[in-house]
Image (tube, helix red, strand yellow):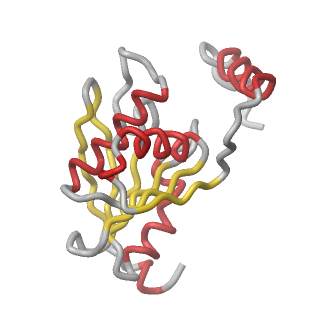
Amino acid sequence: MSNDATNAQRETLKIPSGDVTMVADAYGDPADPPVVLLHGGGQTRHSWGSTAADLGAKDWYAVTVDLRGHGESGWSPDGYGLDRFAGDVTCVADFLGRPPVYVGASLGGNASLAAIGLRPDRALGLVLVDVSPFLQPAGTSRIRDFMVSHAETGFGTLE
């Protein structure tokens, strides 16, 4: 991270999206072109923090978002389907008042791709990180089983 990025100002934003409020951090000048960085499943906006600070120091208005059910964003009684995440992504562009470039990792990438499919006018560009065009049922089942098995008790140890 550059010295400029280390000194970058961070502003916390609250973005309404249907049944939840998402929490986001913004770096840089709001007059600069917007770039929205979206994390993967089980992660938070902080995954992109140093990248966003670097972008904010390089004439981008960088926004990192906690997707619904992640980090400080609200939990959704209406569920966590891809359509909900895609709606959240569109709400970010609406909140900014102009279309951004999206950078999405895993879940954030799939949500961005789905959002742009629904509303291509709400995006300037898309960068996908760790996104596959095809889901492997065995892989998604393993992830789901792992998450469900730890839902009530959490992890047994710190290791």
Quarter of the C terminus within the rendering? top right
Horizontal and vertical percent position of residue 28: 30, 73
Horizontal and vertical percent position of residue 151: 61, 17
Horizontal and vertical percent position of residue 66: 41, 43
Q: Nearer the viewer, residue 118 or 54?
A: 118
Label tally: 0
On screen, 38 above or below 9? above
Q: Is residue 118 left or right of residue 13?
A: right
On screen, 151 above or below 34? above
Q: Residue at x 44, y 57 (%)?
A: 102
Q: Residue at x 48, y 54 (%)?
A: 46
Q: Is residue 125 left or right of residue 96?
A: right
Quarter of the N terminus within the rendering? bottom right
Kindly indicate the quadrant of the structure image that contains residue 6: bottom left
Q: Residue at x 29, y 29 (%)?
A: 20
Q: Is residue 3 left or right of residue 26?
A: right
On screen, 49 above or below 71? below
Q: Nearer the viewer, residue 106 or 148?
A: 106
Kindly indicate the quadrant of the structure image that contains residue 86: top left
Q: Residue at x 70, y 36 (%)?
A: 134
Horizontal and vertical percent position of residue 76: 37, 21
Which residue, as the protein is rendered here, is positioned at the far right?
138
Q: Is residue 5 left or right of residue 32?
A: right
